[in-house]
Amino acid sequence: MQIRWVVIGGALALALAVPGALPVRAQGTRKVISIVATSWKFTPDLITVAKGDTVVIQLSNQDPDKRNHSFAARWLIDKPVTVRGQVAREGTDDGRRFFAVAPGDKLEFEFVATEAGSFPFVCGVFDHGARGQVGALNVVTAAK
C-alpha cells in the first residue's frame, strides 16, 4: 500500500516538473470592441477576434437623426449571451437574434467565439441593412 502511494506521488511530481506533461486548456482573452451605430453604418464594420476569445460588443447609438439601431445576426440565435446596459429591445426576427439601442444610449453583450469563420451582422431596423448598415465578425484560429 505504501509503495503505491510512493509511485503515485512520484508520477505526480514528474508530471508537475515536466512542462507540457499535463494538458492545459488554452483560454482566449477578453476582447472589448466598441461599435458606433450612425446613419446607415457601423464603425467599425469589420471585427477580428481569435477562437476562444470572450467578446464584448459595446454598441453605441450616435445617430444624428435620432434613429433606432440594432445588432442582429443569425449566429447569435443559439449562442449564450450576457446583455447589459440600455437595451431598448431584445428578441428574434427574420431568423436573427437582435439587440436594439435607442438614440443616445449604449448597450453591451458578451459571448465566447467558439467557432472559426466569418459571421455577418446587420442592423435589423427596417431598411438599414439594405442601405449598407452591415458588418462581419471574423473569428480566426490562434497561431501555434
Image (tube, grey):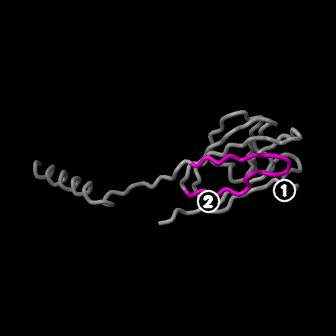
Magenta highlight: main SS: strand
Of callouts 1 and 2, the N-terminal one = 1
Residue 65 locus on image (x, y percent): 89, 41
Which is nearer the eye, 96 or 110? Answer: 110
Query: Is 53 left, or right, of 18 in this rendering?
Result: right
Which is nearer the eye, 54 or 63? Answer: 63
Write down the residue under mark 2.
139
Residue 27 locus on image (x, y percent): 47, 52
Question: Element under label 2?
Answer: strand
Query: Is 7 left, or right, of 77 in this rendering?
Result: left
Query: Is 14 left, or right, of 25 in this rendering?
Result: left
Tell me, for residue 132, which label it has, or none: 1
User: In this view, which residue lies farthest toward the front?
Assistant: 64
Q: Residue at x 84, y 45 (%)?
A: 125
Circles 1 and 2 in contact, beta carbons < 8 Å = no
Residue 97 locus on image (x, y percent): 73, 46
Total label count?
A: 2
Residue 119 locus on image (x, y percent): 69, 58
The image quarter in which residue 100 lies:
top right
Tell whether position 73 is magenta. Answer: no
Question: Element under label 1?
Answer: loop
Q: Residue at x 67, y 40 (%)?
A: 108
- Span highlighted in magenta in the image: 31-51
Query: Of the residues shown, which amino acid type is indicated by label 1?
Result: Gly
How would you rate the neighbour count of disc 1 (Cα within 10 Å): few for under 14, some for 14-19, many for 20 or more?
some
How would you rate the neighbour count of disc 2 (Cα within 10 Å): few for under 14, some for 14-19, many for 20 or more?
many
Query: Of the residues shown, which amino acid type is indicated by label 2?
Result: Val
